[in-house]
Amino acid sequence: MSAPLPAQPPTRTPVPTPDPAPATTRSRGLALGVIATGLLMTVLDGSIVTVAMPAIQNDLGFSPASLSWVVNAYLIAFGGLLLLAGRLGDLIGRRRMFLTGTAVFTASSILAGAAGSPALLITARFLQGAGSAMASAVGLGILVTLFTESRERTRAIAVFSFTGAAGASIGQVLGGVLTDAVGWHWIFLINLPIGVATLLVAVRVLPADRGPGLRAGADVIGAALVTSGVMLGIYSVVEVGTYGWLSAHTLGLGALALALLAAFVVRQATARTPLLPLRVLRSRSVSGANLVQMLMVAALFSFQILVALYLQRVLGHGAAATGLAMLPAAAVIGAVSLGASARLSARFGERNVLLLGLALLIALLGLLTRLPAHGHYATDLLPLMFLAAGFGLALPALTALGMSGAGEEDAGLVSGLFNTTQQIGMATGVAVLSTLAASRTDTLLSEGSSRAEALTGGYHLAFAVGGGLLTAAFVVALTVLGRTRHGAPTRSGRPEHGTAHRTGAADATDVTDATAAHPVSR
């Protein structure tokens, strides 16, 4: 909804004044570029490392068991601190939190690039995850308060979503090229010029905001409960490959994580200044979109990672060639995200666009279950890349729905929550689908199948389960998010095209009034 124009002081004679919109539009465009660049750094850092893992292991002497902590240390810090960072951004200022997080990420990237031992690299990766959480948690919050007009917000979210979706593919290519050309250290050191440039521009273009201060909501006990619970939960999931699902390690730590999170919910219901006001979750757009995201992100691991593994382990592609092979998907995602997505959302509503995107992704994973063990990229895989358009439709629409219940005072918190569920979905998808694929591969090998056939059979199972998760996400989006109506009246009585209109008495436009009724019927 557009913000009301400020009252103008009275003048004796009307004097024409120049329209300030171009400068404002340019400033907001630069701010969007800064936030997208910050996101790109963190996404690149997540995918660029996977390609360089063998070189890192050989150079620093990692054991096979400890090598996974190059990724896990980042994931645990990132996922565990997002919610806390988002709330702190609301309290002390989202601009300050973004700048601090970008500075921490850039400095820890230098430390990672200079690391000469496994312990130092793992420490640097943990700090990188913390910096990423601080910057990423408030990025969407800044966007939704900066772009108040519906169409502009939809386009801005499309750019944000495309950056995240395409960054993984770019990271695989860049990681292979840098590792082969100048060494693995530069996959971290390349963040230095990008981070410095981002900080210099962000200081000038990000809007200054002043939160109410830590006394308005510094729930220390709640912060400790949710941070330790999420970190412990992600840790127990990412270590499933080592200990197994039914081990005392996994079940014990998983139960403890659930207990901590349950205590956090109880704390939020009784605390005077809760870290996560439960009224936020009463918005169907917020709770429904976060649930859809966890299911969708868990399923999409099977496309982003297992397709790359199929290219390398079955078809014999190298690291750089695999990244290049995935670029058509990134190009399709970009074309749809930045082009058709915003127009379709404005025409039909975000919920309907999300459903269309999920349907395309279900078809994609269904067709991937038919990949042959002795296939060819050009005929068996390349045509399927066009179905990746579902990413370009679903991600911006889902992000818009997830942030649509965010009021000014809670935008950072809702942004942090949305990013947190993304990381939980990613960690769960990695653990579940990779374990299922490996188990199926072992079974097929024991039955006498060739290595290529066994690997492909394992990937087929993971694709099928991923398709099931996407089907569940489709059902949730269809039933929980509710109907949207193009041009439905907002609270001000003006139509707001392209806005996802929440439905029901417990699903308000603003989380500050989450119990108000909405004119659109359920």
Image (tube, rainbow, N blue to C red):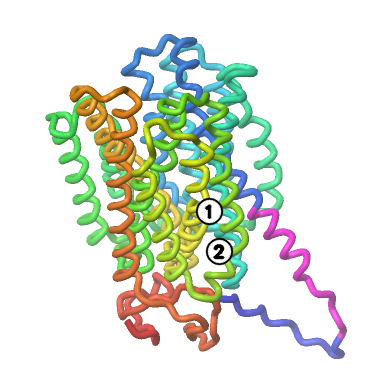
Residue drawn at x 31%, y 80% as measured from the top left: 505
Instruction: Specify the segment rendered in magenta.
Output: 15-32
Number of residues whose C-alpha sits closer than 10 Å to that of mark 1, classed few (under 14), some (14–19) or many (20 or more): many
| Left/right of residue 351 with respect to residue 448 in the rendered view | right
- Tell me if residue 273 is in the magenta stretch: no
Residue 161's disc number: 1
Residue drawn at x 50%, y 12% as measured from the top left: 116
* Rendered position, 472 above or below 99: below
| Left/right of residue 197 with respect to residue 137 in the rendered view | right
Residue drawn at x 59%, y 52% as measured from the top left: 334
Assess whether mark 2 and mark 1 are in contact (beta carbons under 8 angstroms): yes
Image quarter in which the N terminus is found: bottom right
Q: Secondary structure at mark 2?
A: helix
Q: Secondary structure at mark 1?
A: helix
* Rendered position, 506 above or below 374: below
* Tag 1: amino acid: Ser
Q: Which residue is mark 2?
A: 341
Q: Earlier in the sequence, mark 1 or mark 2?
A: 1
* Tag 2: amino acid: Ser
- Tell me if residue 24 is in the magenta stretch: yes
At which x and y percent is residue 38? 58, 44
The foreground one among 331 and 142 is 331
* Rendered position, 427 above or below 442: below
